[in-house]
Amino acid sequence: MASERPPITSHRRVTYLACRTDAREHDRATQRRLAARLAALMGCEFDELKGTATGPTVDLGYVVPDVTITSLDTARALGIRGEEDLFGGVVPFPFVATKTISHPLIDAAAAAPSGWQVDFPERVRDVVLAGWSAFSPSDARDAGRRLLRDGDVRIKLASGIGGSGQSVAHDETELDAQIAAIVPAEFNAGVVVERNLVDPRTYSVGRVRVGSLRASYIGTQRTTRSRHGKEVYGGSAIEVARGGFDALAPLTLEDGARRAIAMARAYHEAALACFAGMLASRSNYDVIEGRDAKGRQCIGVLEQSWRLGGASGAELAALEALNDDPALQTVRASTTEVHGPDVPIPEGATVYFAGVDDHLGPLTKYAQVHRDGLS
């Protein structure tokens, strides 16, 4: 029986750390529910803390933050010493947790944040799309003009989440107008100026560790329509294997998925090698495949996530199945987000949110294991 097996962690408490002051209630509720289920999986008590203020006697146990921890000192103050102490990630500088990590600066004289280093963009240049990171309007314009020679350009705020804070420029007039519309303070965090792709397909590649449980996965994202008619994130379907990235090799996958895994793994290993002190027990990489303006097929890592994310419900559902059956090696799981009322919930699914958001309207989020995908 599962209860007779040794516990998967030595921690006795799981603490959900709510750091974002701008989080919507549906996100906060979803993350709190995820953290509570992690506590149940690990056989721990559950607690919640707002902010990162701690004292010398505070014992948070296993920490589940809603952001990537962007300071090694903060991580130590929270009692985080290694991957076994949190669900998420720790990086040494704030920019490392954003989209700007992936691309180089336009030149050596360009504005740069504290801690910037050139090694990482150089190491990953073959596994990301063509582009630059910019921390001033003039650098962003220069980068955009260079990219426009080969087609449309996508401009992304480092602060953007879930596809927000993005625009596409088709010529220099549009480029200049879109950069001029960016609030100057946004350049403190930076913007990415990147090759735009059409007819995209986005793969999700990830690696998770919770105590002694380890799993990796490959999957795809889907979109849905919000009540405002916008195309937004609609969930992820993932195929999960017990173990690290190597465990994905035996899976029957098409060529695009295998390329996505190789690129995500190269990105992951480069980050750990380049940023001293970095930890990541939860890593998710969006890998996009599509065509550029000249019809050329392109593929590359679009974004990294070292924190709770949209696929985390599926990740946890898979980990629960793996923990329940030590002989189980692979499992299929998914998350679904539906905008609108009266959403039918599949039997056995875990609902993470079902309510009304002030901005989005009726919204339901759930995760499930697909029983025909157990092996």
Image (cartoon, rainbow, N blue to C red):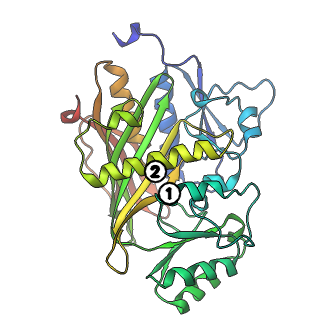
- Corner quadrant of residue 371: top left
Q: Nearer the viewer, residue 103 or 235?
A: 103
Q: Residues within 10 Å of mark 1 (few under 14, many from 20)?
A: some
> Horizontal placement of 324 versus 124: left or right?
left
Q: Is residue 358 visible?
A: yes
Give SS at disc 2.
Answer: strand
Residue type for callout 2: Tyr
Q: Nearer the viewer, residue 210 or 268?
A: 268
Identify the residue at image location x=67%, y=56%: 95
Q: Which mark is residue 124?
A: none
Identify the residue at image location x=39%, y=55%: 363
Q: Position of residue 178 (x, y in %)?
A: 57, 83
Q: Residues within 10 Å of mark 2 (few under 14, many from 20)?
A: many
> Horizontal placement of 138 versus 305: left or right?
right
Q: Nearer the viewer, residue 198 or 57?
A: 198
Give SS at disc 1.
Answer: strand
Residue at the spot of label 1: 303
Residue reaching furthest to the bottom? 173
Q: Nearer the viewer, residue 182 or 265?
A: 265
Identify the residue at image location x=51%, y=26%: 39
Kindly check if marks 2 and 1 are in contact, taking CB atoms under 8 A apart as contact: yes
Residue at the spot of label 2: 285
Where is 124 relative to 272, above or below? below
Residue type for callout 1: Glu
Where is 68 relative to 106, above or below? above
Identify the residue at image location x=40%, y=10%: 3
If you read the primary sequence from the N terminus, does the residue marked by circle 2 or circle 1 appear first? Answer: 2
Q: Position of residue 260 (x, y in %)?
A: 37, 52
Q: Position of residue 312 (x, y in %)?
A: 44, 42
| Number of numbered labels in the structure image | 2
- Corner quadrant of residue 136: bottom right
